[in-house]
Image (cartoon, rainbow, N blue to C red):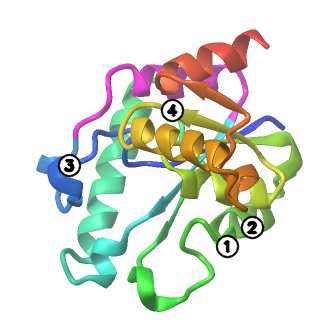
Amino acid sequence: MKTVFLDRDGVINRNPPNMGYVRRWTEFSFIPNSRRAIRELTQNGYRIFVITNQAGIGRGLYSEESLKDIHCRMVTEITEAGGAIEALYYCPHHPDAGCECRKPKPGMLKRAAQEHNVNLSNAYFIGDTTTDIQAGKSTGTATFLVLTGLGQGSYHEYINAEFHQHANRELCRPDKIFTNLYAATCWLLSA
């Protein structure tokens, strides 16, 4: 079955200013057409999973209960718009925790694949950071970089890695680059 993994912040919703965290629902704001994109993917038979780092929990900035409330409300609004999220996976750990789930490590993708019988080599991962791209690449998943959220900075990081011949440039190289989730969805549905 067709499967898309989505990062959350910067792909589905706007990133808070100053590299902050969405700590409560009142700080959550959908990127224009992200709900429409998810609806169209759903209506065209795609299974959709959200894969998101949430280090604000590990930093003590908000609780897992707050995150679950945000996710519940987000899924409700997506459902009301005609879309469906099959499951959400998040890493609550501090970046220095050394866990296996925090992107760019592929732990969340592997867990989702195992729990939902997903063939990662036939799936897509849409994200706005090079860590999203690296997580997808390490599992054989096709990767799309979107230029919303942190995407423009990630694009420049990828270009500079290419220009300077960095060792990890292949892991940073997305398979495709799109302006936003809706543009990526339009391409997927026309391919």
Which residue is drawn at the image coordinates 20% and 74% (left, top)?
Answer: 62
Residue 98 pos. (x, y %): 54, 89
**Numbered circle sitting on residue 146:** 4
Magenta segment: does it hold 32?
yes
Q: Residues within 10 Å of mark 1 (few under 14, many from 20)?
A: some
Residue 165 pos. (x, y %): 70, 51
Write down the residue under mark 2. Answer: 110
Tell me whether circle 2 and circle 1 mark residues in contact (CB < 8 Å): yes
> Quadrant of residue 134 in the image?
bottom right
Using the numbered discs, state the Cα–Cα distance from disc 4 to disc 2 in whole angstroms: 22 Å
Using the numbered discs, state the Cα–Cα distance from disc 1 to disc 4 in whole angstroms: 22 Å
Amino acid type for the residue under numbered disc 3: Pro
Q: Magenta segment, which residues?
A: 29-46
Q: Quadrant of the C terminus?
A: top right
Tell me: residue 106, above or below residue 17: below
Query: Quick one: SS at disc 2?
Result: helix
Residue 108 pos. (x, y %): 63, 67
Using the numbered discs, state the Cα–Cα distance from disc 1 to disc 3 in whole angstroms: 25 Å
**N-terminal of the two: label 1 or label 3?**
3
Q: Residues within 10 Å of mark 4 (few under 14, many from 20)?
A: many
Horizontally, residue 101 falls left or right of residue 168, namely left
Write down the residue under mark 3. Answer: 16
Horizontally, residue 51 falls left or right of residue 164, namely left
The answer to whether one can see residue 64 in this image is no
Residue 109 pos. (x, y %): 69, 62
Amino acid type for the residue under numbered disc 1: Gly
